[in-house]
Image (tube, rainbow, N blue to C red):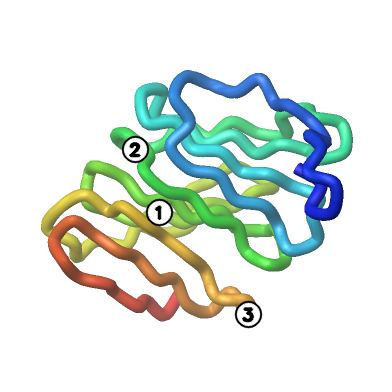
Amino acid sequence: WDMETGAVVRTLKIHLNVSSVAISADGKRVVSGSYFKSTVKIWDMETGAVVRTLKIHLNVSSVAISADGKRVVSGSWDKTVKIWDVETGAEVRTLAGHSKVVSSVAISADGKRVVSGSWDKTVKIWDV
């Protein structure tokens, strides 16, 4: 959406049931997470093309992208947080510690911390 006019800028044909979206700080990438497909898609904002599809863990509930656009963070029903390399699609790290669904994730502007919220009634701050 255009923030000034409210007009739709682009419509992305996504995967089944989008559960979460995020946009990179530079506005070049959009990240979407799918609950039923258990995938995260990284999109080029200008062209609308899929840059990469990550086959993730069980039922993606939340996604975030680092300010530099190099890392994606996902939260899931499997109670974990995963960090992914955008360029290669490789899993960089799994953060485990929640006892229920991870419902929300965020990454700090400097990329050094990840925050996760869970149905276990906790918010965890991770040094990454």
Q: Looking at the image, do the residues carrying marks 2 and 1 touch, with CB atoms under 8 Å apart?
A: yes
In the image, residue 16 sits, relative to residue 127, either above or below, namely above
Task: Report, in whole angstroms, how far the alpha carbon at label 2 lies from the one at label 1.
Answer: 8 Å
In the image, residue 115 sits, relative to residue 43, either above or below, namely below
What residue type is disc 1 on? Lys
Tell which circle, 1 or 3, labels the residue nearer the N-terminal end: 1
Q: Secondary structure at mark 1?
A: strand
Task: Report, in whole angstroms, how far the alpha carbon at label 1 lies from the one at label 3.
Answer: 18 Å
Q: Secondary structure at mark 2?
A: loop
The percent position of residue 76, horizontal first and vertical second, equals: 31, 45
The percent position of residue 31, horizontal first and vertical second, equals: 61, 43
Quarter of the C terminus within the rendering: bottom left
Quarter of the N terminus within the rendering: top right
Mark carried by residue 58: none
Residue occupying the point 47% across, 77% down: 113
User: Residue tagged by mark 3?
Assistant: 110
In the image, residue 95 sits, relative to residue 103, either above or below, namely below
Residue occupying the point 52% across, 36% down: 40
Residue occupying the point 48% across, 43% down: 20
33 sits left or right of 122 in the view: right
What residue type is disc 2 on? His
26 sits left or right of 101 in the view: right
Q: Secondary structure at mark 3?
A: loop
The percent position of residue 109, horizontal first and vertical second, equals: 63, 76
Q: Looking at the image, do the residues carrying marks 1 and 3 touch, with CB atoms under 8 Å apart?
A: no
Task: Report, in whole angstroms, how far the alpha carbon at label 3 lies from the one at label 2.
Answer: 25 Å
Say how many tags the image has: 3
Quick one: which residue is furthest to the front in this view? 5
User: Residue tagged by mark 2?
Assistant: 57
User: Residue tagged by mark 1?
Assistant: 82
